[in-house]
Image (spheres, grey):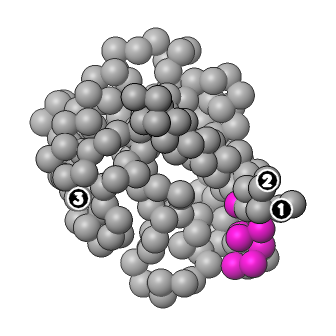
Amino acid sequence: MHDEHKGRAAVVGATVQWLERAVIGLNLCPFAKSVHVKRQIRYTVSDACTAADVLAALDVELQTLVDADPQLIDTTLLILPDAFADFYAFNDFLPRADKLLRRRALEGIVQIASFHPLFQFAGTGEHDIENYTNRAPYPILHLLREASVTRAVDAFADAAQIYERNEQTMRALGHAGWRRLLETDDERH
């Protein structure tokens, strides 16, 4: 049990580092800093290995998010270190996650964003730098409250420009800059 706890803590630690250094540090998502600073992000590490197990974990996390006070849990990162090593399998799974949202009548209440170590936007090459805006240390299903997303978009004057700004940021950073950004403190010394 102790090793399992240490393993989960390391997974959460790597995820928080990515969130702080990349997502918040590069301002890839201008809405992320607020929920991070307020400690309103729920980090859940799932031991799911199969699509069915991931769906079961997702179902639990959807209910947890919906039942929670938004001031305590505004968003959830369901981290999947043992599932979907292959990006295309992960991508093929996403419609099943959306189907679960519909079955639970949560469309318009919760939305799911996705991150993966090998994330690739349609029409891009595997190593194109713009893919890195959605690359995380592990496959992640990000559960967001629609009301919070709407408030954040309304408060952000140029929300429509985020994707383009992120592309510019990533091109300026480059692959070497990305690697340096995510180096652990041990790797830096």
Tell me the crowding category of disc 3: few under 14, some 14 to 19, or many 20 or more residues within 10 angstroms, Cα based: some
- Report crowding for label 1: few under 14, some 14 to 19, many 20 or more residues within 10 A (C-alpha): few
> Mark 2: few, some, or many residues within 10 Å (few <14, many ≥20)?
few
Which numbered tag is attached to residue 188? 1
As drawn, the label of residue 93 is 3
Task: Check disc 2 and report the residue beneath it.
Answer: 185
| Residue range of the region highlighted in magenta in the rendering | 175-182
Asked if marks 2 and 1 touch (Cβ < 8 Å), the reply is yes
Question: Which disc number belongs to residue 169?
Answer: none
Where, by quadrant of the figure, is residue 33 drawn? Answer: top right
Left or right relative to 33: residue 126: left
Q: Quadrant of the C terminus?
A: bottom right
Instruction: Give whichever of discs 1 and 3 has the lower sequence position.
Output: 3
Above or below 69: residue 152: below
Q: Residue at x 23, y 32 (%)?
A: 59
Secondary structure found at label 2 = helix
Between residue 179 and residue 39, name the one nearer to us: 179
In the rendered image, residue 81, in percent from the top left (x then y), is placed at 40, 51
Give the Cα distance between marks 1 and 3: 36 Å
The quadrant in which residue 67 appears is top left
Helix, strand or loop at disc 1?
A: helix
Query: In this view of the protein, can residue 160 be seen by the observer?
Result: yes
Residue 91: horizontal and vertical position, in percent? 30, 65
